[in-house]
Each structure stands twice: as structure tokens, then as C-alpha cells.
Amino acid sequence: MIKLTINNATTHLPLKKAKGTFVTRNKKAAELTDQFFDNIKSSFGYGNISLNIFTQILKKYTPKNIKIEFLELPSKTPSKLSLHINNNGKINGYLLFLPLEKTNQISKTQVGNIMQSVLELFTRILNPKYNKRGIDTINKNLNNSQITQLLNTIYSSKMLTDTDLDKSLIGKSAQEKIDILQTIRYNTKLKLNKYKKGNKYQKEIEKLYRYKNMTKSEPVKYTQFQIPKKIKLIEKKLAEIIKEERAKLHT
């Protein structure tokens, strides 16, 4: 298998421009997402908007060094953001998949869904560790079925247990365990934030255009995934491993 690498120049903001703590950078990502939404929501006043209008507005808020390719999905298909990986395994930016109507337009009913991808885009641009940790974890666990099974449990409605975590981390060094759990923690927290924000934006756009008899969308029902419980369990396991490692340094 090809080892994945990252072209930081087209995937992240330079560190000198993305200063601050993890919390500070996530706050900045949320602010950019809010600003983008505030700009684009009025564009729906006359109905659906074209893909061109959407991309031009998004580019206003995206650093010029970041490479984004926009790809079409059938209407009513969930939007998604993916890393753009070339044939040599280098990540050169992002692929933003957007659900489009036949006229190459974006419907108001898809706003909340698409805003989830926009939030993830800004979060990854401002937090190089999201991609770096993720790629390092993938490179080290390409054929690890236990990690795959763990991820399937975390990103589904299945219950996560201490035993699940312990089984998946068998044979790993303390640092590898920390890296794996941090990667999952970052992405799980991002997923929960995306669901919450997506529902918020969709509710706002429907409230704004309720006088036009806008069709309402069903909010994303994410409570079944038990994400907060899973995050707590992951953080508890992380704390235990870090505490054990620190204790070793003092023996």
C-alpha cells in the first residue's frame, strides 16, 4: 500500500496564521462558518442557488492557498468532505461533494447538510493535527481489523465499551494508543459538532423563508449514535494511559 503524505501548502493554513490553542482554532472555524452562512443565506431569496454562486462565496472565506474541488452528488444525498489524494498517495487539498438539483443548483432543503461539510472544511484547514494524526494512524494501521472494527462501532449506533477499546489497542505502544485515541476523539467531537450546527443552520434557513412555504427537512437524528458517551469513554481511557506513562517517569 502507498504511504499517505500531506501537501501542507494546499491543505492547511501556515502555522503562523493558525496560531492559538485547539479551542481557539475551533472557535475561529465556527466563526468562519457562521460568516459564510450569513453571507449565503440571502442568496436563496429567489429560490435555489447555482453551484457557481455557492463556490464563489465559499472561496471568499477560504484561504487562497487551499485547494478545493467541487463534485456533484444526486439531490437529497448527504454532502460530504473528503481529502483529495493523488495517485502517489499525497493529500493535495479537499473534495467537497454537494447534492445538486438537475439544474446544477443547491436547494434550501440541503443547507444544513452542506453546512456540516463547510464546518469540517474550516476546522481541518485551521487544525493541521486533524489530518496529520489521521494520516499517521492510517499509515500505521492499514491492515488492522481491530481498529477498523473499533471505528465501525464508534460511528454507528452500537454501544462502545472499555473492552472494545482495550481489544483494539492490544500490542500498541503507549504513544500509539494515545495517537489512535486522540485521532478518534478529534473526529468524533467534530462529527457531533457538525450534526448540531447542521440542524441549527437548517432551522434558521427554514425560519427565514417560512413565508415562502418552504418545505421543511427532518433534523438529523444523531442521538442514536451515543456520541457524548463515546467521547467520555475515549477521554477516560486517554487519561488513564497518560497517567500511567507519567507515573513511570517518576519511578
Image (tube, rainbow, N blue to C red):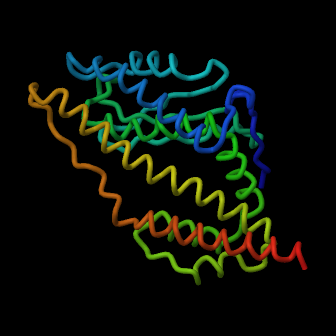
Q: Position of residue 223 (x, y in %)?
A: 34, 62
- Identify the image quadrant of the N terminus: bottom right
Q: Position of residue 124 (x, y in %)?
A: 60, 39
Give the quadrant of residue 147: bottom right
Q: Would residue 44 be found to the left or right of residue 162 on screen?
A: left
Foreground of the two, 213 or 197: 197
Q: Would residue 24 be found to the left or right of residue 50 on screen?
A: right
Q: Residue at x 77, y 66 (%)?
A: 176
Q: Would residue 161 be found to the left or right of residue 174 on screen?
A: left
- Identify the image quadrant of the C terminus: bottom right
Q: Residue at x 24, y 31 (%)?
A: 205
Give the quadrant of residue 84: top right
Foreground of the two, 192 or 235: 235
Q: Residue at x 74, y 33 (%)?
A: 8
Q: Tell me: residue 26, above or below residue 239.
A: above
Q: Position of residue 160 (x, y in %)?
A: 50, 75
